[in-house]
Amino acid sequence: MKTLLAVSAIAITFSGALHASEESKTWDASEEAKQFVQDTIVLGMLASPYGTGWTDYDQLHTYFARARDNGITGHEMTLAAADMTFETLLEQHYHFRSAMAQQPENYLIVNETRDIEAAHLQGKTAVIWNSQTATILNGDLKKMALLKDMGIKSMILAYNDIFRTGSGQLAAYNGRDIGLTPWGKSVIDEMVRFGILLDLSHTGSKTANDAMNYMDETYPGVPYVYTHSVPAGLYANEPNATPRGCYRAIPDDEALRAAQSGGYISPTFTEWMMDGVWPEDISPKQAADMIDYYVQLVGIDHVGIATDDMFSTELVVQFATANASMYDDGGYMIDAFNKGATGNGELAKILAAITDDLWARGYSNEDLAKIYGGNKMRVYAQVWEGKPPEQFLQEYPERLRLRQELRDGFYSR
């Protein structure tokens, strides 16, 4: 059983520091599944900014080395969250880049989809920057151009609380969803202008639906996504579920709207968001259940994967305590940790086993290639590069063939 956390209003005690991802269980899988993951572009998500889930550069290197060794091509990586400023963004960007500068041969900053393919070919980690907050603009829309040049590829409007853009999921859960504001619309305008993907994860339902309405009316055909969101409908009837469910979960209608826009929805394999009903490490079957739920709901072309890895439960709890008003969830997250939900389904340790499970359900290799990375790349190409989906889909099979030939040649030298 994982270490329990004792939490009071003024103090947090631990029986040793926890590094959740590093302690996640490695699940047995077939050699065929392991090879498939190695051969396939796989894009996950690391949702811990510097100082929130990690502070040790070696910890980051270990995590990404393990991911590379197990065939994970790259990650959407969070640079900022909550109510962080532009200055905080620069600080966090510095630490990521400083860590990566220690091993420049192992990382490739992504500007376009071909960079993801290059990282896969060369055995490097593809770095796809994400921001989980719009507060990094410091109220200045002109900063969006700087964010574009820094390589920010997606952005969330509101995280947990109420912001100038609208309300996050926790505020909405507590009955305070103000909806998308005029400023929020202006932020969306600039995101679309500069090819930054609108991510509606963590956004309150009214705010999210207002944003989707605005996108559909003002920018028809431009997709929006949920990069790491729990499917509320999957476990609402679990025997140990709380009556209201997890405030991080999204209803089916929101997932359907994102798919209808041409976007994708990625379930996150993070146990505390599962209401604590799945204690200990999430199993490959439980992760596959989430993937399959979304596939049955929105279709095979609109589902991805994510983990929302947090590395250190200790640092996460410290951050939540220091920002108590933004994590005013009645002890929900801490209760889930205390039930044993302190880990993540780290892709490097779980994806091959998920592959075996999905094969047993009848999923083809083509299906899994879409879910593991292809669907994200189609959306990226459209938003980042202005490439119509049909053009990407027409070109991609040939690019896959050429890439595999190059990869085979690269590793046979």
Image (cartoon, rainbow, N blue to C red):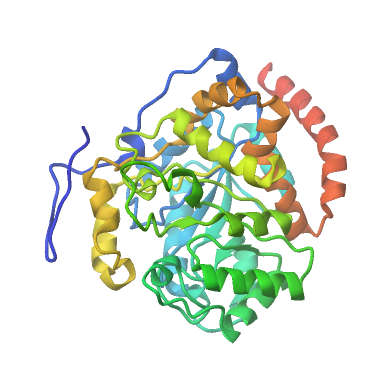
Task: Answer yes or no: is residue 142 visible.
Answer: no
Q: Nearer the viewer, residue 218 or 183?
A: 218
Task: Answer yes or no: is residue 168 visible.
Answer: yes
What residue is rendered at 84% in x and 55% in y? 388
What residue is rendered at 14% in x and 65% in y? 9
What residue is rendered at 81% in x and 28% in y? 401
Please state the horizontal and vertical placement of residue 329, each as a whole percent of the image. 30, 64
Left or right: residue 109 compared with residue 216: left
Image quarter of the N terminus = top left
Left or right: residue 329 compared with residue 273: left
Left or right: residue 116 compared with residue 335: right
Please state the horizontal and vertical placement of residue 135, each as a whole percent of the image. 48, 75
Image quarter of the C terminus = top right
Please state the horizontal and vertical placement of residue 40, each as a whole percent of the image. 66, 30
Number of numbered discs = 0
Res. 356 image quadrant:
top right
Up-down relation of residue 311 to residue 28 (above or below): below
What residue is rendered at 75% in x and 74% in y? 217
Q: Nearer the viewer, residue 306 or 176?
A: 176
